[in-house]
């Protein structure tokens, strides 16, 4: 594949640093292509382009921008198979998953925000003999920083509302997964989006991401990534009073009540634990199960997990591909070893030291889906975000204990409750300190709903009106009659 370039001011350009990084396929260890290792000057170039394009883009009507989003959705849909293939190459996820989740959602993000923005209504308040008119304006040039687990899915989740509200963009994807951000730039270029409206700068977080956050002419930052990085972003942006949206890590609880119909919920529980090799911020990595049904649960769950097909991401029948990198595999395996030191028992899976997971791909960063029992709820493996195919099992005796265990973490992004009584599940869900709780389902998303975390899982909400509010400034004009 041709070396990737940055996309700045309507042109594909090499980085001013003249440096590049290898983009690796984690399932094979092979180099796919190279990606610019950009620096501050490249960010400066992109920020100038975005600011130069601001006035004209902000002057377009909402209807015109909605039209742009529909055209982008159509063009991405026509390239769905390319999106799935590139995402699978970059991340090691099964191409079937990339097609079903990444490609489909990247298209629907643009379509959804086109349709949702069309529902915006003018807000007018009458009082004291005056009329208050609430106006929306773009924030300006916005910086979008995204991680490697769901590359175009998460980038498009930010680009669509930012564009439709009239902002111009500087985006930085993870340098490990740059291919579909490049595809998006190609699509926008072919559609002749006015130059400077969307700019893409590839490179490392501490170079490119940091320069974007620190730049005074980037007026808002929407960041999705780890909690430690989010803290650096917040510290840099706060003294400039930048608008900031932080979507960070999670350590989500999956609560299985004693009345849960195991036969019907076990497949959902496996999905909630191991989709994308557990590398979804919403995956449940701590399973809390009522002690009365523990044995039946373990029997059914472990059997299903052990039968997941791990290996070649290009094989349509593969359930789980590789993790994102060899370094990440080492980190996850370190946690599995730590779990054993902490007194845990591996019920299925484990490290790949003894037997390679996929003989056909000995250089791939594969791991077996792993279930660990017997750890205390405050063990490191039960409280720190592992972000891989590892779940820990814990038992509780009653609802109060389940809630206390679910809340015994610094994170608060998501969770799920599984029960035969949906009303009971709804009541319990409200006691869990997190931004999203599903009852008898998982990753069932209505894009109009608020999305985001509490505690160390982030600040702010995205989705529906919340995204449109983040990417606009509201001002009130009060006219006395
Ligand atoms: P990181 O925090 O390492 O990176 C996220 C992005 O930030 C990358 O583009 C990264 O660049 C960049 N970055 C790194 N350092 C800086 C810096 N100093 N300033 C600005 N940007 C920087 O996260 P991962 O990529 O490892 O993603 C996994 C994490 O993302 C997990 O914690 C997961 O829970 C979280 N996540 C949260 C979601 C949510 O909605 N709450 C959704 C998906 C994931 P580079 O890649 O070059 O380091």
Image (spheres, grey):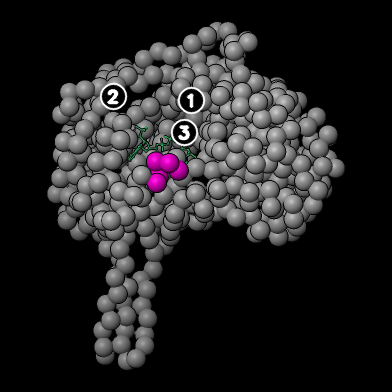
Q: Residue at x 61, y 34 (%)?
A: 381
Say few, some or many: other residues with alpha carbon within 10 Å of mark 3 (under 14 / 14 to 19 / 20 or more): many
CA distance for labels 3 and 1 = 12 Å
Report which residue position mark 2 lands on: 35
- The answer, for residue 74, to whether it is visible in the render is no
Camera-side mark, 1 or 2: 1
Residue at disc 1, secondary structure: helix
Residue 328, x across and y down, in percent: 48, 25
Going from N to C along the chain, the mark reached first, 2 or 3, is 2
- Label 2, ligand 1: CB separation under 8 Å: no
The one nearer the camera, 317 or 295, is: 295
Compared across the picture, whether 206 is left or right of 319 comes to left
Q: How many marks?
A: 3
Report which residue position mark 1 lands on: 328
- The answer, for residue 40, to whether it is visible in the render is yes
Q: Is residue 151 above or below residue 363?
A: below
Report which residue position mark 3 lands on: 149
Q: Are marks 1 and 2 in contact (CB under 8 Å)?
A: no
Going from N to C along the chain, the mark reached first, 1 or 2, is 2
Q: Are marks 3 and 1 in contact (CB under 8 Å)?
A: no
The one nearer the camera, 258 or 94, is: 258
Say few, some or many: other residues with alpha carbon within 10 Å of mark 2 (under 14 / 14 to 19 / 20 or more): many
- Label 3, ligand 1: CB separation under 8 Å: yes
CA distance for labels 2 and 3 = 18 Å
Inspect the magenta stretch and tell me whether residue 203 lies in it: no
Residue at disc 3, secondary structure: loop
Give the magenta-colored segment's residue range. 227-231
Quadrant including the C terminus: bottom left
């Amino acid at each position: 594949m041709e070396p990737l370039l940055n996309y700045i001011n309507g042109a594909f350009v090499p980085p001013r640093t003249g440096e590049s990084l290898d983009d690796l396929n984690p399932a094979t260890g092979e180099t796919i292509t190279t990606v610019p290792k950009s620096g501050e000057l490249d960010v400066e170039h992109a920020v100038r382009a975005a600011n130069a394009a601001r006035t004209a883009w902000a002057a377009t009507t909402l209807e015109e921008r909605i039209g742009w989003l529909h055209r982008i959705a159509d063009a991405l849909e026509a390239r769905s198979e390319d999106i799935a293939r590139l995402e699978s190459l970059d991340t090691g996820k099964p191409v079937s998953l990339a097609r079903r989740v990444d490609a489909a959602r990247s298209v629907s993000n643009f379509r959804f925000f086109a349709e949702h923005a069309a529902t915006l209504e003018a807000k007018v308040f009458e009082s004291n003999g005056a009329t208050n008119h609430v106006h929306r304006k773009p924030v300006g040039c916005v910086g979008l920083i995204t991680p490697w687990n769901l590359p175009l899915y998460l980038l498009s989740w930010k680009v669509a509302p930012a564009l439709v509200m009239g902002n111009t963009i500087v985006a930085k994807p993870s340098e490990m997964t740059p291919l579909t951000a490049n595809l998006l730039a190609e699509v926008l270029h072919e559609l002749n989006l006015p130059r400077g409206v969307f700019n893409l700068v590839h490179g490392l977080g501490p170079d490119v991401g940091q320069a974007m956050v620190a730049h005074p002419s980037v007026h808002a930052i929407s960041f999705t990534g780890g909690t430690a990085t989010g803290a650096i972003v917040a510290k840099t942006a706060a003294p400039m009073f930048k608008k900031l949206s932080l979507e960070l890590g999670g350590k989500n609880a999956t609560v299985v009540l004693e009345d849960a119909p195991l036969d019907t919920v076990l497949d959902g529980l496996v999905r909630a634990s191991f989709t994308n090799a557990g590398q979804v911020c919403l995956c449940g990595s701590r399973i809390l199960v009522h002690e009365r049904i523990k044995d039946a649960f373990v029997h059914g769950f472990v059997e299903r997990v052990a039968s997941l097909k791990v290996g070649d991401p290009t094989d349509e029948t593969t359930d789980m591909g590789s993790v994102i990198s060899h370094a990440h595999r080492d980190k996850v395996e370190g946690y599995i070893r730590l779990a054993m030191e902490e007194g845990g028992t591996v019920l299925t899976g484990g490290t790949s030291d003894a037997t390679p997971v996929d003989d056909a791909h000995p250089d791939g960063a594969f791991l077996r889906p792993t279930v660990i029992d017997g750890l205390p709820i405050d063990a490191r493996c039960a409280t720190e975000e592992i972000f891989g195919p590892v779940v820990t099992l814990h038992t509780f005796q009653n609802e109060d204990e389940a809630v206390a265990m679910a809340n015994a973490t610094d994170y608060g992004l998501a969770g799920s409750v599984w029960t035969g009584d949906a009303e009971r599940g709804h009541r319990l869900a409200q006691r869990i300190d997190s931004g999203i709780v599903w009852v008898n389902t998982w990753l069932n998303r209505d894009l109009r709903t608020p999305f985001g975390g509490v505690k160390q899982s982030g600040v702010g909400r995205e989705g529906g009106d919340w995204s449109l509010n983040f990417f606009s400034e509201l001002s009130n004009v009060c006219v006395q009659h």
